[in-house]
Amino acid sequence: AQSVTQLDSQVPVFEEAPVELRCNYSSSVSVYLFWYVQYPNQGLQLLLKYLSGSTLVESINGFEAEFNKSQTSFHLRKPSVHISDTAEYFCAVRRAAGNKLTFGGGTRVLVKP
Amino acid sequence: ETGVTQSPTHLIKTRGQQVTLRCSSQSGHNTVSWYQQALGQGPQFIFQYYREEENGRGNFPPRFSGLQFPNYSSELNVNALELDDSALYLCASSLSSDTGELFFGEGSRLTVL
């Protein structure tokens, strides 16, 4: 079975400051890794994913995440946040041969002006 | 291209009642998954349907059941509602059962009194 731990439940950050959201996972098999974002009163949107290849993956809106197999981590970073980045962020894993996403508990990011 | 749509968006039931939630998949998607997101937590996998058959189930009791129709739309049924069933129920569709990206709807928020 897989599990996902997001170490920070809330992260307050000032506009234009950098942010890092931590995600650690456990699994005995190969996994795919995902970050989803959930804006207030909306469903989940895929932010970025790691399936294979380069361990650094980027999204179109400036977020990036790095897969670290030895530390079983997939931390999400953005060098400069905007007010519009205020949302809840979920890290998730899925077995490479499987159909179920296992989510972490989420990290709420509040960007302050 | 129409995204994933869910209905109803909000509903209130009392303990012991039954509820049916509906989901229309994104065009061309043959796989539907359902997730339960309790307040302040990450989504949890309920089950997945592929070509009208259940294709994986999470740790939910049998009173949680589902259907997928020939047009790939889906229903989630919950019998004998309990207070702890209060949650946001998310539907996600994908192109295939094991490798496709999940596209989420905005969810149905169920309150059980």
Image (tube, coloured by chain):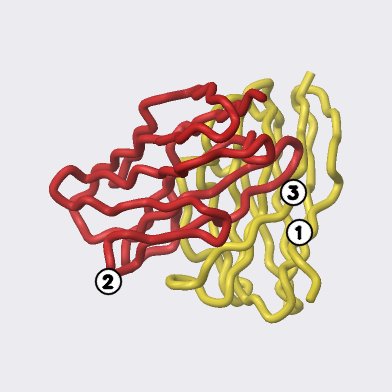
Q: Is residue A43 above or below residue B102?
A: above
Label 1 crowd (10 A; few <14 / some 14-19 / many >=20): many
Mark 2, mark 1: which one is toward the viewer? 2
Mark 1, mark 3: which one is toward the viewer? 3
- x, y percentage for residue B92? 63, 59
Residue drawn at x 75%, y 26% as measured from the top left: B16
- x, y percentage for residue A10? 51, 22
**Which three-letter amino acid code belongs to the residue tagged 2?**
Gly
User: Residue B106, which numbered label?
Assistant: 3
- Which residue is the site of mark 1? B23
Q: Chain B in the picture: what colour?
A: yellow
Asked which quadrant contains residue B93, the reply is bottom right
Label 3 crowd (10 A; few <14 / some 14-19 / many >=20): many
Mark 2 vs mark 3: tell me if same chain. Answer: no
**The C terminus of chain A, quarter of image:** top right
**Which three-letter amino acid code belongs to the residue tagged 3?**
Glu
Residue drawn at x 36%, y 27% as measured from the top left: A7
- Which residue is the site of mark 2? A53
